[in-house]
Image (cartoon, rainbow, N blue to C red):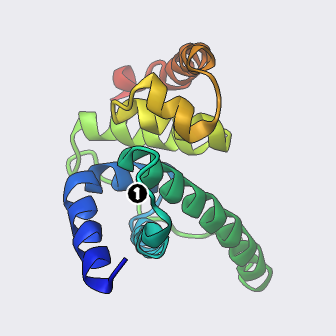
């Protein structure tokens, strides 16, 4: 693959699948700066992986796999970095900016709560939830995760119930 072909495919993938990448990023990183960092990592990993893409899998399956594996590696590194920083930065109270209810819509708060709940899931479950939100077919999910389509259905039913339980009352609290 020439550098020009790689650049052309990469630009097309960004144009067509940016939403997919952003969902993975938002599902794995909670703050906007972390999301920006992770998006850069995912973009770089996708660029680097392009020469290995042979077209045997769907593009979306490849992008999900690269994005989610990159996000998992980033999370592990981020945890290690934070533990190191916490050793040096022990405060009794850490001030945090609280979002104003006037600044965001209730729908956005529900979406934020959903992504927060997804970030607390085990990696495979989080990946499955993100793909489901993106409308990926059971067949593609099975391809990416290496599990049967039937098991995808079972896991999604369990995830829906689990997330619904975690989000119960969120809309009423707003």
Q: Is residue 162 above or below residue 78?
A: above
Q: Look at the image and tell me in which quarter the C terminus lies.
A: top left
Name the spot of residue 86 as percent of width and height, x first. 74, 76
Name the spot of residue 165 as percent of width and height, x first. 55, 18
Q: Residue at x 46, y 23 (%)?
A: 138
Q: Residue at x 70, y 65 (%)?
A: 76
Quarter-wise, where is residue 13 in the image? Answer: bottom left
Q: Secondary structure at mark 1?
A: loop
Q: Is residue 9 above or below residue 6?
A: above
Q: Is residue 159 visible?
A: yes
Q: Is residue 121 visible?
A: no
Query: Is 134 placed left or right of 169 in the picture?
Result: left
Quarter-wise, where is residue 1 in the image? Answer: bottom left
Q: Which residue is mark 1?
A: 98
Q: Residue at x 45, y 19 (%)?
A: 169
Q: Nearer the viewer, residue 123 or 81?
A: 123
Q: How many marks?
A: 1
Query: Is 148 placed left or right of 59 in the picture?
Result: right
Name the spot of residue 27 as percent of width and height, x first. 47, 48
């Amino acid at each position: 693959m020439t550098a020009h072909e790689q650049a052309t495919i990469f630009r097309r993938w960004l144009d067509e699948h940016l939403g997919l990448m952003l969902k993975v990023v938002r599902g794995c990183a909670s703050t906007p700066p972390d999301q920006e960092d992770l998006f850069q990592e995912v973009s770089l990993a996708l660029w680097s992986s392009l020469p290995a893409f042979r077209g045997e899998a769907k593009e979306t399956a490849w992008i999900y796999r690269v994005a989610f594996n990159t996000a998992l590696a980033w999370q592990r590194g981020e945890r290690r970095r934070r533990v190191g920083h916490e050793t040096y930065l022990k405060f009794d109270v850490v001030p945090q900016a609280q979002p104003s209810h006037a600044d965001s819509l209730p729908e956005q708060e529900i979406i934020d709560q959903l992504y927060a709940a997804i970030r607390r899931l085990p990696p495979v479950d989080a990946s499955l939830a993100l793909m489901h939100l993106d409308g990926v077919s059971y067949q593609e999910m099975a391809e990416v995760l290496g599990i049967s389509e039937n098991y995808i259905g079972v896991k999604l039913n369990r995830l829906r119930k689990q997330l619904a339980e975690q989000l119960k009352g969120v809309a009423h609290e707003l």
